[in-house]
Image: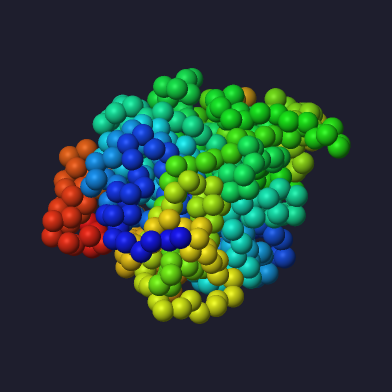
Amino acid sequence: MAEIVTLAEAISATVHDGDTVAMEGFTHLIPHSAGHEVIRQGRRDLTLVRMTPDIIYDQLIGAGCARKLVFSWAGNPGVGSLHRFRDAVEHSWPQPLELEEHSHAGMANRFAAGAAGLPFAILRGYRGTSLADNTAGVADIVCPFTGETLTAVSALRPDVSVIHAQRADRRGNVQYWGITGVQKEAVLAASRSVVTVEEIVDSLEPRPGAIVLPAWTVGYVAVVPGGAHPSYALGYSARDNDFYLAWDEISRDRDRFTAWLDRHVYEPAVTGREGVAAC
Amino acid sequence: MLTYTADEMMTVAAARSLRNGMTCFVGIGRPSEAANLARATHAPDLVLIYESGTIGAKPGQVPLSIGDGILAETADSVVSVPEIFNYWLQPGRIDVGFLGAAQLDRYGNINTTVIGRSYAEPSVRLPGAGGAPEIAAACREVVVVVRQSRRTFVERVDFVTSVGFGDGAGSRGRLGLTGGGPRLVITDLGLLRPDPESSELVLVGSYPGVSVRQVQEKTGWDLVVSPDLAEVPPPTKAELTALRELLSTAPGSARQTGAPTPRPVAEGVP
């Protein structure tokens, strides 16, 4: 049953050195504040799993939290490169980063297999690409009914999944809507989970199209208004496109990145300014 | 006399390749600009599908990312990411996949993963696959929008992220790819189509003021010119006005202020 705690308590209870951690949210509802908390708590050797590593993992990689990245598209959406990610891959800064690389369809199906309690998922994918030759966990499989050759991808089972949602009620039932990505699958596939929310309400008003994760499927809930910034929470905030553009400059240079981290991630733990991540 | 840039010619030509009422799986960057231009001009009922799960999105401006709020708010339906790939893309329901590329080869194979011979030690690390491999595999046809140079148009891509025609004629069938593959490649210098026999990309459309020789000089293989080579009409005033209006409202559109556009490697990759 979900426990409602502070963000620091939720991360400290769930994310340990060496864990496999999935922070999901497909452009929308990206749990940025939770990522910052992982950085502040100094976690190391994490295997970070996420379809689109985006700015959130650029920060974790640059901060030295990651040993390995499991992903399908590592860019700054609509802007360009993820410079901390590239620096890690091309120059091993601040440390080498092992890659396990898939397509979006493959990653989505791997999460779905994890949620379904299956060892692998089947799709039509990867055939003829160089991905299959360079990625473990991708194999041909023959359909027992038609003889068609399809692709199997191994299930993802994170130790911890972390997501951001619009709201939860006092019992810890979680509700989110808009672009819902692969968060339900990520939470159900994981051993432990953390959900940050914009607000906690007395009871969840039913909403067509919204996903509800019942309290008994969720580990910890923490209230973090604006916790998706610079991503957004539909109905609560808008995507801060200017920050995505500014990140291109901030992240390009190691010193500037480190200074940004000091000012906007490490220092707010003392001053309580977390969530105000300007450039 | 209208003046326009090579990029504007490319985006307009890309928009024209989309027919009204088509369903279109849209990559971010220039493909998204072109698809939104088509919707604003000759194809108001074009169905835009983004891999964020937004089906039938009707943004009033070009979104910066495939997950901008405007896409969800204007969509006919919003589905999860596993669903958009499994139920919508995979069965071949979608007419056209609209993609970008960092490298493209003579058989229309796309690389958006690494530049360099070694995957483990690349000279340039690109964003990776995203949705492109399955878009390229499963859509009824694929249109690629990409700036042309010897760096991007290569004999053989360093890494096959998304399959065009593989090793040539018959490859797609042998690989079990269900969609038709690249129908058209639109660049800032001209239009290329696969030869019906060999599946090799050949020049079929030239732009006003761009010579065949210029296009060949910017191609990393011996580019064959189709006997049916035709000149592509320049952008009309209506097309240019609509395009400039669209881009002037796009978030972070540096192009509008005359600033150089970095956006190099991630462009067009979903």
Camera-nearest residue between A25 and B180: A25
Q: Residue furthest top?
A: B117
- Say which of B86 and B246 sits in front: B86
Q: What residue lies at 58% left-to-right and 30% top-to-bottom?
A: A137
What residue sits 13% from the left and 60% below the top?
A271
Residue at the image position 78 percent from the left and 31 percent from the top: A142
Dividing the picture into quarters, in which one does residue A171 lie?
A: bottom left
Q: Is residue A156 above or below residue B220?
A: below
Q: Nearer the viewer, residue B100 or B92?
A: B92
Compared with residue A59, is residue B119 higher up or lower down, i.e. above or below? above
Q: How many marks?
A: 0
Residue B49's x, y, as percent?
Answer: 62, 59
Side of B133 where B152 appears, left or right: left
Residue B28 x/y as whole percent: 51, 53
Q: Is residue A247 above or below residue B222?
A: below
Q: Is residue B106 left or right of residue B226?
A: left
Residue A83, visible in the rendered structure: no
Q: Nearer the viewer, residue B242 or A199?
A: A199
Q: What is the x, y in percent for residue A166?
A: 43, 69
Residue B218: x, y in percent?
A: 52, 32
The residue sitting at the right extreme is A146
Q: Residue at x 48, y 46 (%)?
A: A191
Q: Does the rendering let one see residue A250?
A: yes
